[in-house]
């Protein structure tokens, strides 16, 4: 899967990310991955749910993965949880 | 699956929920479901990751589901995202 089809969810309003996901599919993407870390994980789930329920026809959840990433901060290394939600066209 | 094996994640410190999950497995549960809604979703992912990486041997993620629930508030009905992370003993 191409990285161009990934939407990274951060601290902006959720509809920004929903629009990004919908745009990817409108531009012909077969799959879109929604990724987030830490507190933004909840917003990533909102993004997927709103995109699926309100905007995207014929698209479904393909896979949901959670994992732990080690990141560098000013205070050294720390662990942060992450999520990846892959949406795909229904066959 | 028995509801006794469900841990509902809310606004308490994450280690409270990690302890609840570990205790369920210690008491003989084959599966434990971690559930959360809204902003607590991030903490549910933290709970699963910390429990798996630091405390539980021979336990793996079985399934991760996200969905939208309609809840009643003082201002009427509203939608909220939810997550369910099912952990199970490795076969």
Image (cartoon, coloured by chain):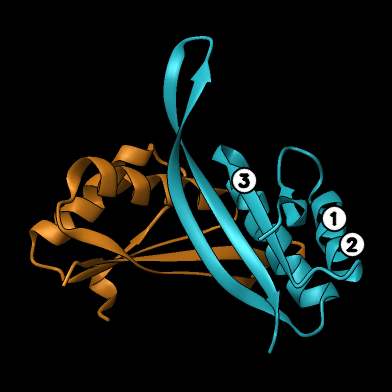
Chain colours: A cyan, B orange
Q: Earlier in the sequence, mark 3 or mark 1?
A: 1
Q: Vertically, is A19 above or below A38?
A: below
Q: Vertically, is A10 above or below A66?
A: above
Q: Nearer the viewer, residue A57 or A11?
A: A57
Q: Earlier in the sequence, mark 2 or mark 3?
A: 2
Disc 1/disc 2 C-alpha distance (Å): 5 Å
Q: Chain of mark 1?
A: A
Q: Which residue is mark 3?
A: A36
Q: Which residue is mark 2?
A: A23
Same chain for labels 2 and 3? Say yes or no: yes
Q: Chain of mark 3?
A: A
From where the camera sits, is residue A46 visible? yes
Residue at 27% x, 47% y: name it: B51
Residue at 27% x, 81% y: name it: B1
Work out which residue is located at the far top of the displayed protein and give it.
A74
Residue A90: numbered disc:
none
Disc 2/disc 3 C-alpha distance (Å): 18 Å
Residue at 25% x, 79% y: name it: B2
Residue at 23% x, 70% y: name it: B31
| Disc 3 crowd, CA 10 A, few/some/many (<14, 14-19, 20+) | many
Q: Secondary structure at mark 1?
A: helix
Q: Quadrant of residue A90?
A: bottom right
Q: Which residue is mark 1?
A: A20
Q: Provide residue A57's location: percent of width, then percent of height.
A: 82, 83
Q: Provide residue A25's location: percent of width, then percent of height.
A: 84, 69
Q: Vertically, is A58 above or below A38?
A: below
Work out which residue is located at the far bottom of the displayed protein and give it.
A91
In this rendering, would A60 be left or right of B3? Answer: right
Q: Provide residue B3's location: percent of width, then percent of height.
A: 29, 75
């Amino acid at each position: 899967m191409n990285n161009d089809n990934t939407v990274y969810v951060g601290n902006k309003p959720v509809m920004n990310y929903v629009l990004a996901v919908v745009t990817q599919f409108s531009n012909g993407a077969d799959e879109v991955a929604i990724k987030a870390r830490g507190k933004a994980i909840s917003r990533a789930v909102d993004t997927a749910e709103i995109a699926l329920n309100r905007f995207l026809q014929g698209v479904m959840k393909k896979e949901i993965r959670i994992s732990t990433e080690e990141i560098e901060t000013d205070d050294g290394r720390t662990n942060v949880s992450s999520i990846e939600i892959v949406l795909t066209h229904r066959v």
